[in-house]
Image (tube, coloured by chain):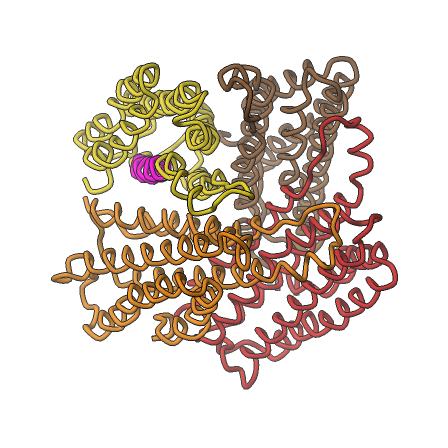
Chain colours: A brown, B yellow, C orange, D red
Amino acid sequence: MEPDTGRFETYSDGVFAIAATLLVLEFSVTSGHDLGHQLLHLWPSYLAYVTSFVTIGIIWMNHHHTVSLIGRSDRTFLFINNLLLLTVAFLPFPTGLVGTYLQRDGEQAAALAYAGTLVVMAALHQVWWGYARVNRRLIADGTPDSALRAVDRAYVPGVPMYGAVFLLAFFSPLAAVVLTFAIAAFYLPSAALFDR
Amino acid sequence: MEPDTGRFETYSDGVFAIAATLLVLEFSVTSGHDLGHQLLHLWPSYLAYVTSFVTIGIIWMNHHHTVSLIGRSDRTFLFINNLLLLTVAFLPFPTGLVGTYLQRDGEQAAALAYAGTLVVMAALHQVWWGYARVNRRLIADGTPDSALRAVDRAYVPGVPMYGAVFLLAFFSPLAAVVLTFAIAAFYLPSAALFDR
Amino acid sequence: MEPDTGRFETYSDGVFAIAATLLVLEFSVTSGHDLGHQLLHLWPSYLAYVTSFVTIGIIWMNHHHTVSLIGRSDRTFLFINNLLLLTVAFLPFPTGLVGTYLQRDGEQAAALAYAGTLVVMAALHQVWWGYARVNRRLIADGTPDSALRAVDRAYVPGVPMYGAVFLLAFFSPLAAVVLTFAIAAFYLPSAALFDR
Amino acid sequence: MEPDTGRFETYSDGVFAIAATLLVLEFSVTSGHDLGHQLLHLWPSYLAYVTSFVTIGIIWMNHHHTVSLIGRSDRTFLFINNLLLLTVAFLPFPTGLVGTYLQRDGEQAAALAYAGTLVVMAALHQVWWGYARVNRRLIADGTPDSALRAVDRAYVPGVPMYGAVFLLAFFSPLAAVVLTFAIAAFYLPSAALFDR
């Protein structure tokens, strides 16, 4: 019996939405200090929150669109999908690190953890899609080649882009996070699949 | 290919429900003090919790109703929708600040953060709806004009109302939160879309 | 336009499932003490967790069943539904208090907060159902009277039962929690709607 | 009236996805220490996170598949299902203990708590399935016997396997967690139901 893809979509959708909404738990303030001052100095947390929330939103849409092209699934595909969700669900932790450590001791480690998570996520996206696409293994019948190529174009640049973020984090953690934000705000939407 | 709106509804519904349910995590007590006394003095947290929970519930219903009038979506609309969700998912943080700081040092900053979040959320609601409505860009065929005008009436007062809350927060943070509660309890239901 | 009930079911289902799953966050241990010893002495937390998880599961099933009898909804009903969800989503906080304070100073306040939340929840259930049922206001056409009476029997004992828990909490907080557990384990399933 | 199984699937799916996504909240770092050093020394947390996330993902798929063979449900079955969800939702707590205590004082208690939770979960899975399967009590008409035997093969080894993990935890907590990981990575997928 080949499972319908609806089986893992509910679960995947849930993990994406929950991971995005849990990001807010990384904000915190300390009592005994001026609150207004603290809220202004939380800007690294705001930057990290917006970057991760927008990123998760867009990769959710790409994930959702890609699944619509997939007509069947198998054990390996579901296992890769699960690993992909594992990295998405992990994102609140490095996001919180960036918010806490940016512009302080430890900012390089925080930015590397953040960028590293994104590199792994992008790589798993490509493995996930590649597994389904090779010889149209899991592709729904009647899907035009152009639709497959559009998905290729969305996933292929992920690893080099987030790899560049990772390298940049060695020199300027802040610049690395800003580049991640720029990717989420400008690149991802333009490459996104959701209005093709 | 124009995506069906169902694609982003699951994700949006999830974010609204999770954000509302995460509000409870902002409650906390300190060991070593009389618990009964502490629970009574948590009233700012109860007020903030009820206000935010009711507000999220009603804007979810408006969001859900509005989406039912929308027949297609595009990249820009989905991006605005994502920013809207970002502000909804952020609400537990300023709600927690209001609960912790009301009637203490820092209450003005807490109330301003809370009201500011609501102003941004109301503004994004209007941009979101305006984008879909202009020239019936994304409106489902056959939707009567009266249904569009009902949505207008629900979203237009948001920015001035929460703007008033923001201004009031400079003078009386408590009054600002009470006004937000009154809007959620009295105004929003009467302007709400869900039984039109 | 009368909204279909599906509109608020997704949101309600989400809040119930999230509230139940957030209960686990109330567990905590302190470093520097023997972990095995601590885990054994966490039994009030285990008792509170199991009690609340089972309770939420059963009231979710009753809620879900009741909604299946409802054919339309209106503004007031949705507002009451939202207040009901608000109390369900609040439950992790008093559950955590019971887990932390049982058998310590403050146990009475913790048990009263817990029982009080359950009384309010039971009362809102009855208001919610009563509003829909009076003159079959929101009941789906063709629903037999026997189905309505089954729901009556499920909701009517809630307030007196949890009222008894509340009173018991003044004398023995532990007994009050045990009674709540017994209600969840024995009474609720027998009165439950889900296999009528 | 016999409830359709869809009734409890939404709730179950939600609990699985939320429990998996909450696992990330168990990560934490302490300020005042070198962050890079801390992130490298968090490996017990990474191991525990990956193990639990992959385990929950696979048992969700088995749960989901099994439910597709079930044509009706009753009070007892739903009660057992609820207890099953209770153990799944509890998993983030012992996962966090393993992450915090592995290779430190208390590691045995942490690994026993983790393995014990998995044993209970596996036992409840078997009770849950056994109840539905005996005399095909709740099995959908027309389900072939081979499909039932496939489910048997997936659930029967659970208790002995996790029982072995439990015993191993007395000798080597680390080995017990690694065995749990190996079960999730190698055994469960091969025994899994999702591509039968």
Q: Does A168 sit above or below residue D80? A: above
Q: Residue at x 55, y 20 (%)?
A: A33
Which quarter shows the C terminus of chain B? Answer: top left
Q: Residue at x 45, y 65 (%)?
A: C172
Q: Position of residue B166 (x, y in %)?
A: 34, 18
Extreme residue toward the right, this view: D171
Q: Does C78 sit above or below residue B158? A: below
Question: On the image, which quarter does residue C121 sit in?
Answer: bottom left
Which region shows up in magenta? B50-68
Check residue C174 for magenta coloring: no
Q: In screen coordinates, is B138 left or right of B95?
A: left
Question: On the image, which quarter does residue C171 sit in?
Answer: bottom left
Q: Position of residue D83 (x, y in %)?
A: 54, 67
Q: Main secondary structure of the magenta part?
A: helix
Is there any visible trace of residue B68 in the rendered image? no
Q: Residue at x 44, y 49 (%)?
A: C14
Check residue B59 for magenta coloring: yes
**Camera-side residue: C144 or C90?**
C90
Q: In screen coordinates, is D137 left or right of C86?
A: right
Q: In screen coordinates, is A48 left or right of C190?
A: right
Q: Position of residue B56 (x, y in %)?
A: 36, 37
**Camera-side residue: B168 or C71?**
B168
Q: In screen coordinates, is A93 left or right of B143?
A: right
Q: Position of residue B170 (x, y in %)?
A: 34, 14
